[in-house]
Amino acid sequence: MRQPAEFVRWWRGREGWESETIAGIPTGWSPKGLYLRIDGRTVVLDRDEWSYCDSSS
């Protein structure tokens, strides 16, 4: 689980559907979601908001 990965979050904005993409190294799981290491800090991505994004295709 130490390979860089991208995750995407979608929400309904004023102009329609909007998205945010975040990239980092997954390091483990918490009860709330996934620990992601980004630029030397660790954040938790909520499992109900974020999805894995395969940008290689």
Image (cartoon, rainbow, N blue to C red):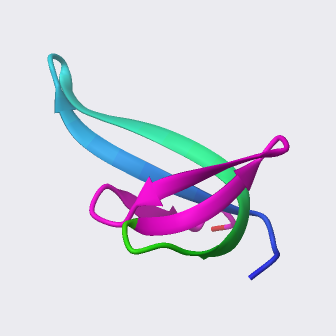
- Most common secondary structure along the magenta stretch: strand
Q: Is 54 included in the stretch rendered in magenta?
A: yes
Query: Which is nearer the eye, 34 or 5?
Result: 34
Residue 26's spot in the image, x, y percent? Answer: 68, 69
Q: In the image, is 14 to the left or to the right of 33?
A: left
| Residue 47 placement: quadrant | bottom left
Q: Is 47 included in the stretch rendered in magenta?
A: yes
Q: Is residue 9 above or below residue 11?
A: below
Image quarter of the N terminus: bottom right
Magenta extent: 33-56
| Residue 4 placement: quadrant | bottom right
Give the residue at x 65% y 59%: 36
Residue 12's spot in the image, x, y percent? Answer: 16, 34
- Residue extending farthest to the top is 14
Q: Is residue 43 above or below residue 18?
A: below
- Residue extending farthest to the front is 31
Count of numbered labels shown in the rendering: 0
